[in-house]
Amino acid sequence: MDLECGLRSTALRTSGSWIRRLFRAAYRVCLHRSQVVQLDPLEADRQIEDFPLGYPRYSALVASDTAFYICRPFSKTRARLLLLKQDKIAVLEERLTQTDDQEQSPLFLGMSRADSNPKRREILDELDIALRDYESDDYVERICRILKLTSPSRRDITSLSNWLNGTAALARDETRYLQNSTDLASLDPGDDSLISTVHGLVEDALIRFFKRFRKLSGHTRSRDAHVYLYSGALITRLSRLAISSLMGLLLVIPIAACYATQSVPIRLFIIFFANVALLTAMASFSYRRTFELFLAGATYSAVLVVVLSSSSSGSASQ
């Protein structure tokens, strides 16, 4: 036997055994991990009905769509506390004014270091504490943030109420907050209200007229046949198509109406009416500033005037 060949063959057998051992070890690790993933319920794609009935299931429903993040801002309570804090400071301010007006020594009012009036010092100390309480934890700023929250849509409130009434997941006393629609706020920044409205109309139409809508692959968050939590792209595409068609009609209909008449006053009236319709729709379905509405109306009028003037000059040249 050749010594060198023997050494090489032994090295090959040794390296081959190490490779087999590593492969077996890696296989056992992968098998163990796969078993852990299959047995771990937290890693599985759980549906709403997989959670225990009560707050776990209701929380899963709320977390399934950002539009369901609806809460009470407690506007009346916040206003009451704010008014009480404000009035406390106002009373102390009036007491300070009266003390200054009744001061017998003018020197005390012009030199705080020499001021020996104990009543004024006491009022100032109370004012300092009251103002710190008024501004503590950014109370006023937190109220401003709460007031900036938008109101939830009636559709989302009704959806949560219907689900709670149908499942009886929570006690009635703890779901009564949904009945007070004037004191509800949505934490979802959401899309443009026009998009949300059209999205809801399209979804209602699919639920009512498309019987196989519930069987589409986008309904993966709930097994309940009465729960529609669609996550596919069908509703979004149909909503965009509907909005695009509406915008196209707002541009085409006034132009077609102006083409149908040669009277300048009637054309001006058509342009005016089209602007009013557009601005009304924008003000109703979206939150726009006055300057933005004015700019949109001016741009829309300019487009109509340019199209009509170009068409008039083209017909005149012919």
Image (spheres, rainbow, N blue to C red):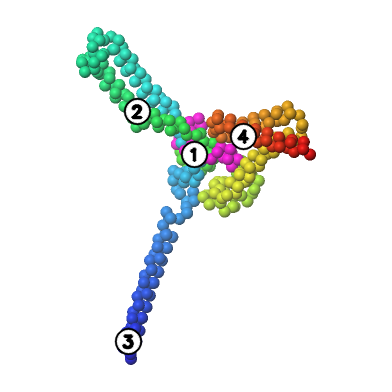
The residues tagged by marks 4 and 2 sit, at their Cα atoms, a distance apart of 45 Å
Q: What is the number of the mark on residue 299?
A: 4
Residue 162 visible in the displayed image: no
Q: Is residue 221 left or right of residue 84?
A: right
The residues tagged by marks 1 and 4 sit, at their Cα atoms, a distance apart of 28 Å
Count the numbered circles shown: 4
The residues tagged by marks 3 and 2 sit, at their Cα atoms, a distance apart of 88 Å
Labels 4, 3: front one: 4
Question: Which residue occupies 34% across, 20% down?
Answer: 89
Q: Is residue 31 magenta?
A: no
Crowd band around label 4 with a 10 angstrom C-alpha radius: few (<14), some (14–19), many (20+): few
Lower position in the chain sequence, tag 4 or tag 2: 2
Question: Which residue occupies 30% across, 21% down?
Answer: 127
Q: Is residue 175 magenta?
A: yes
Q: Is residue 63 above or below residue 287?
A: below
Horizontal and vertical percent for residue 204? 61, 42
The quarter holding residue 254 reads top right
Residue that carries the numbered disc 1 in the rendered image: 189
User: Given the image, on which type of amino acid does mark 3 rest?
Assistant: Glu
Residue that carries the numbered disc 2 in the rendered image: 135
Decide whether the magenta segment is chiefly helix, strand or loop: helix
Labels 3, 2: front one: 3
Residue found at the far front of this picture: 317
Element type at mark 1: loop
Q: Is residue 80 above or below residue 235?
A: above
Question: Which residue occupies 56% across, 32% down?
Answer: 292
Q: Is residue 130 above or below residue 281?
A: above
